[in-house]
Image: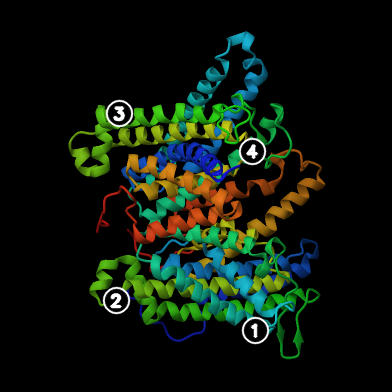
Amino acid sequence: MTATEVFLQQVIYGLSNGMIIALVALGYTMVYGIVELINFAHGDVFTLGGFLALTIVGALGAAAVLNPDTLGDSSHWLLLATLVIGAGLFCGGLNVLIDRVVYKPLRSAPKLTQLVAAIGVSFILVNIALFWGGAPMKILGNGNAAAASKNFPEILEGSNLLGEESNVVLRLEDLAIFAVTIPLMIGLTLFVKHTRLGRGMRATAQNPIAAKLMGIDTDRVISATFLIGGFLAGAASVMWSVYNNSISFQMGFRAGMDAFTAAVLGGIGSLPGAMIGGVLIGLIRSLSDGYIETRWTNVVVFGVLILILVFRPSGLLGLKQREKV
Amino acid sequence: MSAAAPRFTLFSRSQLIVLGLLAATPLLDLAMPSLQLSAPMRTIVTSAILALGLNIVVGWTGLLNLGIAAFAALGAYAFAILTCEIYPFQVGFWWGVLLAGAFGALAGWLLGAPTLRLRGDYLAIVTLGFGEIVQDALKNLPAVTKGTQGINPLPAPTLGMMEFSSETPVRWFYLYLAILAVIVFLCRNLEFSRLGRQWFAVREDELAARCMAIDPDKVKLKAFAMGAALAAVAGALIASQLSSTGEPSNYDFQMSILALCIVIVGGIGSITGVLVGSIVMVGLNNVLLPIATQSLQRAGIGSTGNVLTSPDNYKFLFFGLALVLMMRYRPDGIVHSAKAVKK
């Protein structure tokens, strides 16, 4: 491989992973923008999305679904769409439930109280994922120990689109990630900009009390925010599982940290910021994998996070804001 | 708010009761030797020291530190490098513990200086990131840290003519308990000192504290460094007890969260609360869970095949529920701190 090919390859990896990170980061940034809570459990909602997707695949029997005779050549895409929507709705619903049960009663509590509660929720979800990886996965043939990583079946064909002799690998999965994430991001942007509920979201983010006075049902807005954030995390987890072909009950911690870093890098509260931040973190990760060493990548990412927070806490696109007294 | 400095006593009554209860636990071990309590008991003591360090930062100064385990790791490795026979220093147990504490304070200072002016939740994430960086760095620098093997063997404490070893677990437990008592004494004095009152002022209202000519950055930094020093001492004691630093991933996010659970469940900002919290949390985690696992296995239910029948697998659920429920219904913890102000 020439130096250019190595670079191109890392950029492809980085963009694909970065788009997934961006979807998760949107969930962080939206929730933070509206209720000023670092939703620590977001990464673990993402994990459960992956487990739901694997359960759906197992229940349908991937081999049968992917048989071209039953549904034709589009069966892969149909299955992928089912998974994205299924896991998305599941994670969205779960996120709303968590907000109602745990966060809502603490809305006026000090920020650190809320953050600690969110960490608690995160641990509970990790444990649920651990249990989910036990008996239910065994029935579906993804047996062995509950804590072990589960194989996620190859849904999209893995051959190189640039031809077998090319050193740079671009697979259908890479394109699928763009095909899923970009419409979702465009849809979200249009939704927030042009719908009534979207306007309500922007108003609540700016000033919840004023929004309430203007007749906006802020509780509904907050629920909608958690629903959308969760949906994006669910969609992201499906793409992540399809791309990496393996899921584990702890995958949400790393993914969540990457996504949170991305949200902060872009400027927390800013939607385009989260998207750009996600792609940048993806690229930083893959370039660090390629040019430094894989084992140092997490150090690089966390180092970037700390440096941004210290030198530019408002991120790339965030507004400089003073802490409210 | 303004706690009148109490008449001089070594410990408050409640602290004395809890320390006395801890001191009586070897009797329990004597009565029920099958439980083998002395090892988990020492864990209670070291966890209490770690949590007392965290309490200075979280409870008294109101800064959330999610990476206290990193300082325990730095303390353990500093102790190991200073005392292990494969390195040239070999300063012995006591100097090892003291220097590890000093190193922890230095590390806390270096991390805190640039980051403490951040908002509370951002600071929490920075400390979390720092915890991950320390773990990875220890793992990835095997030339110094022996990588995942950990550094061993490490010396046991000596005190004059007295020797401590795994054959004398009770004696060792009492030594650690004495160290804990000294630290409780120091913390108690710190709490009522000028610095302690400055911490409370900053916790309650930074702006108002600034108006009273308190420099919040400076007192926060002191809290951070002192908390880190105690955590490092705890790390050194843990390492000496295991005779090894263990692998770097022992000092993970879970360890930080266990310390946070101790502080929050026990009673945030209260020394007695931290002691009670360590007994409750470590007791559940290191004593009751293994006993439950054993008895289930003896009854033939706890097969390794089924994830649900192994009590150990409920650990995260348990930590998580503890945090959520405490935040919801009793954010002040089991032991109510008189100084915790209602918001």
* Kind of residue indicated by mark 2: Ile
* Pair 3/2: label in front: 3
Which badge, 2 or 1, comes first in the chain's sequence?
A: 1
Task: Kindly check if marks 3 and 2 are in contact, taking CB atoms under 8 A apart as contact.
Answer: no
A273 up-or-down from A135: above or below: below
Distance, label 4 to label 3, CA atoms, is: 39 Å
For the N terminus of chain B, give its image quadrant.
bottom left
Work out which residue is located at the far bottom of the displayed protein and give it.
Answer: B160
Distance, label 2 to label 1, CA atoms, is: 35 Å
Q: In the structure shown, which secondary structural element does the residue marked by tag 3 occupy?
A: helix
Rendered image: mark on residue A190: 3
Q: Circle 1 is placed at which residue position? A: B94
Which quadrant of the figure has residue B97? bottom right
* Kind of residue indicated by mark 3: Leu
**How is the model colour-coded?**
rainbow
Task: Kindly check if marks 3 and 1 are in contact, taking CB atoms under 8 A apart as contact.
Answer: no
* Residue B235 placement (x, y as % from top left): 61, 70
